[in-house]
């Protein structure tokens, strides 16, 4: 695995930098692209990501092993990696939110964007992108009007953004490797960390359809790398939802 780290300082997006490297053939498995400011950062479904100079850590890991797990499992594994890192740093109250957020007391601390290329081919690769709020002491009113956000600094954790680059990359690598070896176990761990396992939930898919019931867990079916599916006990029986098609999972009740 490559141990190369490419620090960009300020760039449009570390994911874009990593994707360009994949496109021009200069990327290696394990390459790490980092920045402390992005001018065109983006999140899930094309949403923007606010960035102030030297406040956040923006990191993109190129992951191109011999076989990639299900894309949904890659996002779950990345979420667990970020969670491992921020908890180790001192954010003990952090938890996950489906599919790609890390929250503390309902406020967003980090977001994850996994982008895959050439799935199903020998050239299959993905870029695991993370935006982590580290040193920000405040956030714009317009952003706070959209949702609650926080940073490690606001949680009492003193750290410089780039000091967390290597620990975060190592946590991501561990979880991504585990997702390939024990995918069901990692999926179950994600559901536990998101406080969804065994709860009554509403599952929403991209088509607007969905179901309600008790979330029993996750299974991976079919030949390797397999397809991750959520198992939901509904009044009509156990229903399966392909995890990659699920846009939201919301716990119901208290």
Image (cartoon, grey):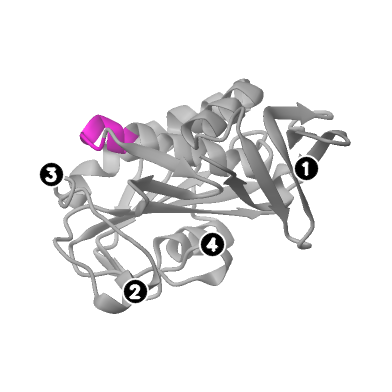
Q: Secondary structure at mark 2?
A: helix
Q: Position of residue 120 (x, y in %)?
A: 77, 45
Q: Which residue is mark 2?
A: 145
Q: Is residue 1 above or below residue 96?
A: above
Residue at mark 2 to residue at mark 3: CA–CA distance: 23 Å
Q: Which residue is mark 1?
A: 241
Mark sitting earlier along the chain (2/3): 2
Q: Nearer the viewer, mark 4 or mark 2?
A: 2
Q: Is residue 241 above or below residue 46?
A: above
What mark, if any, has residue 156 been given in the picture? Answer: 3
What mark, if any, has residue 113 been given in the picture? Answer: none
Residue at 73% x, 27% y is 219
Q: Left or right of 8: which side holds 174?
A: right
Residue at 50% x, 37% y is 194
Q: Secondary structure at mark 3?
A: loop
| Pointers 4 and 2 in contact (C-beta within 8 Å) | no
In this rendered view, identify the residue nearer to me: 191 or 23: 191
Q: Position of residue 209 (x, y in %)?
A: 79, 57
Mark sitting earlier along the chain (1/4): 4
Residue at mark 4 to residue at mark 2: CA–CA distance: 19 Å
Mark sitting earlier along the chain (1/3): 3
Using the rendered view, name the quadrant where residue 173 is placed.
top left
Which portion, as a residue range, is magenta? 85-91
Q: Is residue 85 above or below residue 248?
A: above
Residue 107 in view here: yes
Q: Which residue is mark 4?
A: 44
| Pointers 2 and 3 in contact (C-beta within 8 Å) | no
Q: Nearer the viewer, mark 2 or mark 3?
A: 2
Q: Secondary structure at mark 4?
A: helix
Using the rendered view, name the quadrant where residue 13 is placed.
bottom left
Q: Position of residue 217 (x, y in %)?
A: 67, 28
């Amino acid at each position: 695995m490559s141990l190369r780290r490419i620090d960009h300082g300020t760039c449009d997006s570390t994911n874009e930098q990593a994707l360009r490297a994949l496109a021009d053939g200069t990327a290696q498995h394990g390459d790490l692209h980092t920045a402390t400011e992005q001018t065109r950062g983006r999140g899930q479904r094309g949403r923007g990501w606010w960035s102030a100079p030297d406040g956040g850590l923006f990191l993109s890991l190129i992951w191109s092993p011999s076989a990639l797990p299900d894309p949904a499992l890659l996002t779950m594994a990345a979420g667990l990696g970020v969670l491992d890192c921020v908890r180790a740093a001192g954010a003990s109250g952090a938890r996950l939110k489906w599919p790609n957020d890390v929250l503390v007391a309902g406020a967003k601390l980090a977001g994850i964007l996994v982008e895959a290329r050439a799935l199903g081919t020998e050239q299959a690769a993905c870029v695991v992108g993370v935006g982590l709020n580290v040193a920000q002491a405040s956030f714009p009113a317009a952003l706070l009007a959209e949702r609650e956000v926080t940073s490690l600094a606001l949680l009492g954790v003193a750290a410089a953004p780039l000091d967390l680059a290597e620990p975060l990359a190592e946590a991501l690598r561990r979880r991504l490797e585990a997702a390939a070896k024990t995918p069901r176990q990692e999926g179950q761990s994600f559901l536990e960390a998101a406080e969804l396992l065994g709860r009554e939930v509403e599952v929403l898919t991209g088509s607007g359809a969905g179901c309600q019931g008790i979330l029993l867990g996750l299974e991976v079916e079919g030949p390797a790398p397999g397809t991750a599916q959520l198992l939901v006990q509904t009044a009509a029986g156990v229903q399966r939802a392909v995890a990659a098609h699920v846009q939201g999972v919301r716990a119901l009740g208290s």
